[in-house]
Amino acid sequence: MGPPQNQPSRDRRSQELAQQQQNHQGGGNREGAGYQPYHQTGQAQGQPQGPPPAYSSTLGVSNQQGNSHRGPQPPPMAQQITGEQGRSTPPPSRSRDDLSGLDVAQLGARHDELQDKYRKVKKYYFEKEAQVQQLQNTLAHQRLAMSRTSLDDNEYVNRFSRLDGAINNLAFNIRREWRSVPPWLAPAVNKDATTNQTKEMTAVGRACISRWLVDELFDRFFHPSLDPGLSTQLKIVEKNLRRFAAPTPSDEEKEGLMSKISNWRLATLEGLNEVLQSASAAENRNTLTVTLVEKMVAALNMNLKDPAPAGLEGGVSMIVELAVGIAANLPLESRDVFVEYVYPNSRIDENVMKLETGLPPLTNPGEGIIEEPSRPSVERDTHADEHDSLKDRDEEVESPQQQKSSEKEAQQHQQHHQQQKKKSGMFGGFMGGKKAGSVPGGSGVTAQQALKEQAAKEQQAKEPKEERVRFCGFMAVEVRGRSVLVKAPVWTHAV
């Protein structure tokens, strides 16, 4: 008899029970532990059934035989724990600010050390701040002690404006009374200006009066309340301090020179304080005013018609009193308030000058002495000339081709001169010896002079004309190193 029909099913059940016991005891591997009969998983999860039961039985037998050859294996939970430990990140290292590992004594010592450092830094900071404040206060007190202001800028501007108005009024009143123009101003005025009686003579009057005030009052006397002789000597000393000082190319050196002169002026006034507050101070001022009025009237009458115009002395007296009042405040200033008159033919400086128009052009200038500009104007001209010379020298260095071209022109000029010399000798021989030899050195010298004159004229024609000061109608007032209070009105012409 053969085996019963249900024997294969019993063998399969016995194998499944043995596999479950082996998985329960931990003897199988991960693949055997996770194996389940196909029909059970399919029924549990509701998925379609897979291979037939014969395939699952053979797979179970092969798994059981394979597990017997692998030997003992660790349980699956141990493998999972070791894998998780390998993949986990290491714990963060303790920072240097973490004081959890220090004891109380170390923490207290650390705190005391930081407190000491903070106290030292705080003490050093406040000590330095106190020193800076002390130095600033010292400098401020020194400046306040040294800085003295008799009148502010607006007051100076108002007083000089009143003086300009008085001068303009007197010049307009005497515009028809001029007999001649002063020699120093004649080259800047047309010859027929005294007969045509145009605005030109009003400007001439303003120029004459303004220059006289600067020369005879502002530039001559140190203080109106002092004795005239002493005041003149002190003014000479003040001018010499600036005139004979070392060159001041930098701004710091200029400020140092101005501070030196200002300190001397203030110290001198402090030494003369007793004289300035005495009764003789008012007498000296009145005497100076009267003397200046007489001198100014006499200076104007030298070029005015006889008799003197009415109201001349009254207008002059008003002008002199205003000017003396200004001159009494200038030396009391710690800053350098400088009054300047711009002479004819000075270079134009728009910082201290304002250009005026409305006068007839200079077509027929008069004859007179062309005086040198005043010292500040000379300084401006010399600085400009030095700048031009440096510029020319740089151009010569940068452009050697121009030098070659000038040398060629000189050679051509010499050749032309030799040809002229030969022609003049031939014509002299034909005309006769007496006529040719009448002038020693004869025609060669005259031809050379003619060529020089012609070259000079051509050079003057080629050179661009420069605008220069024709004459100035009022004075310029400047606080040196700071600002310009009053700009000088000037009329210009091409030179």
Image (cartoon, helix red, strand yellow):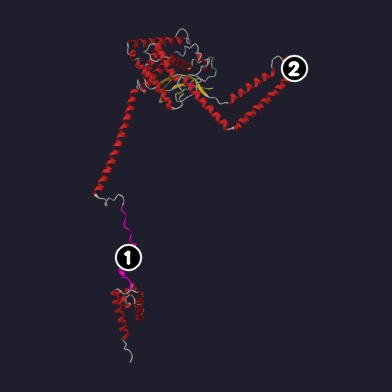
**Residue positioned 63% across, 22% down in the render:** 454
Q: Circle 2 sits on which residue?
A: 431
Residue 400 vertical position relative to residue 344 in the rendered view, above or below: below
Q: In front of the other: label 1 or label 2? A: 1
Q: Circle 1 sits on which residue?
A: 82
Give residue 206's position: percent from left, percent from top.
45, 16
Magenta residues (range) = 72-94
Image quarter where the N terminus lies is bottom left
Give residue 195's position: percent from left, percent from top.
51, 13
Give residue 134's position: percent from left, percent from top.
31, 30
Q: Residue 183 vs residue 114: left or right?
A: right
Residue 396 in view of the camera: yes
Within the magenta stretch, is there residue 348? no
Q: Please state which amino acid type lies under the numbered disc 2.
A: Met
- Foreground pick, 226 / 115: 115
Q: Residue 282 vs residue 179: left or right?
A: left
| Count of marks overlaid on the render | 2
Task: Tell me the SS state at disc 1.
Answer: helix
Image quarter where the C terminus lies is top right
Q: Please state which amino acid type lies under the numbered disc 1.
A: Thr
